[in-house]
């Protein structure tokens, strides 16, 4: 019984990892996905919105995020992103500001929590 559970868990984790990899590898610039906050933001993506969802658990801390693919945008492109992940390589922070959709903490504040990013290389 324990071996069967281990095999099922291993296959389930492998399938989930494969789905995440396949989904992000095929994403075009600007494509978005919704994921639970427990999932790391993949390389080339940024967080663009946070909220609470029963699908990702319960509690008062925002537990769901929308991520956006930045890989493939031309040099000079400007986008807004939450400051909950670092910008991908080739992007620089132009300015910081507050956005209500980027509250990723259980303790909300009016501190700057978002960035305007520009593709520089």
Image (spheres, rainbow, N blue to C red):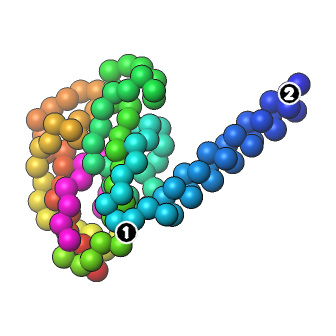
Question: Residue 37 sits in which quadrant?
Answer: top left
Q: Determine which residue is flagged by label 1.
A: 71
Whole-number angstrom distance, CA of label 1 to CA of label 2: 42 Å
Q: Residue at x 29, y 27 (%)?
A: 106
Q: Dot 2: within a 10 Å radius of its alpha carbon, few (fewer than 14), some, or many (20 or more) residues?
A: few
Q: Do labels 1 and 2 touch, CB within 8 Å? A: no
Q: Secondary structure at mark 2?
A: helix
Q: Is residue 83 magenta?
A: yes
Which range of residues does the magenta coloring cover?
77-87
Question: Residue 87 sits in which quadrant?
Answer: bottom left
Quarter of the picture holding the N terminus = top right
Q: Determine which residue is flagged by label 2.
A: 2
Q: Is residue 16 above or below residue 86?
A: above
Q: Residue at x 38, y 26 (%)?
A: 53
Q: Point out the frontmost of discs 1 and 2.
A: 1
Q: Dot 1: within a 10 Å radius of its alpha carbon, few (fewer than 14), some, or many (20 or more) residues?
A: some
Q: Which numbered tag is attached to residue 104?
A: none
Q: Is residue 107 above or below residue 89?
A: above
- In this view, the residue farthest toward the top is 59
Can residue 3 be seen? yes
């Amino acid at each position: 019984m324990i071996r069967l559970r281990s095999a099922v868990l291993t296959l389930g984790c492998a399938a989930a990892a494969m789905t995440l990899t396949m989904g992000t590898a095929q994403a075009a610039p600007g494509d978005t996905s919704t994921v639970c906050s427990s999932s790391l933001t993949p390389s080339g993506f940024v967080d663009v919105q946070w909220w609470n969802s029963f699908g990702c658990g319960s509690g008062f801390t925002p537990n769901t995020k929308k991520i956006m693919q930045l890989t493939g945008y031309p040099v000079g492109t400007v986008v807004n992103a939450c400051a909950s992940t670092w910008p991908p390589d080739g992007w620089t922070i132009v300015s910081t500001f507050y956005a209500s959709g980027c509250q990723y903490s259980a303790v909300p504040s009016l501190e700057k929590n978002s960035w305007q990013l520009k593709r520089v290389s």
